[in-house]
Amino acid sequence: MASWASQLGQKIASPEFRNYLMSTHFWGPVANWGLPLAAISDFKKDPELISGKMTGALTVYSLLFMRFAWMVQPRNYLLFACHATNETAQLIQGYRFIDYHHFGGKEKQVTAKADESLKVPLETKA
């Protein structure tokens, strides 16, 4: 166990790792994580707020940058993971958009709200 921790400490203290931490190869993907985190937080919001055009643009953008992260030498796995996460989140948002606007999601939501407003709470006698 101590040798494993020692090896990790040596790796972190190495000039190569410090150079990596001070490069755009590291900070670019770290800054880019805002996109998938925002998309994931939007899962809880009403699908009426989703922009179909922006979701499509971000889907293509992340797909292209996933390819870039894979093809660049050395491979940028952090950037690839960021855009793979964003691609997945945007595809989910795209599904929510299409379901809401084209497959009756809007009507189901209106019906559910109407049914909810018709329910009358029963009073119990104590």
Image (spheres, rainbow, N blue to C red):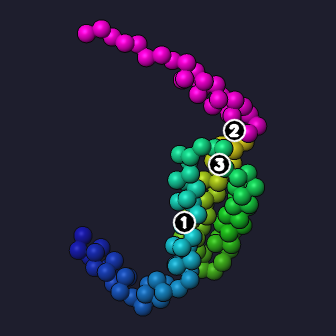
In the image, residue 28 sits, relative to residue 47, either above or below, namely: below
Depth check, front residue: 40 or 21: 40
Mark 3 to mark 1 CA distance (whole Å) = 19 Å
Give the amino acid at mark 1.
Answer: Gly
Give the amino acid at mark 2.
Answer: Tyr
Identify the residue under disc 2. Answer: 100
Q: Can residue 77 be seen in this view?
A: no
In terms of secondary structure, where does tag 2 sit? Answer: helix
Magenta residues span 99-126
Does the segment drawn in magenta span residue 123?
yes
Q: Which mark is residue 34?
A: 1
Pick the quarter of the image with the N terminus. bottom left
Mark 1 to mark 2 CA distance (whole Å) = 25 Å
Depth check, front residue: 70 or 83: 83
Identify the residue under disc 3. Answer: 49
Left or right placement of residue 30 versus residue 69 in this view: left
Q: Residue at image x 60%, y 67%?
A: 80
Look at the numbered discs 1 and 2 and tell me whether their residues touch, using CB distance below 8 Å. no
Q: Can residue 65 be seen in this view?
A: yes
Mark 2 to mark 3 CA distance (whole Å) = 10 Å
Give the amino acid at mark 3.
Answer: Leu
In the image, residue 120 sits, relative to residue 10, either above or below, namely: above
Depth check, front residue: 51 or 32: 51
Q: Residue at image x 54%, y 23%?
A: 116
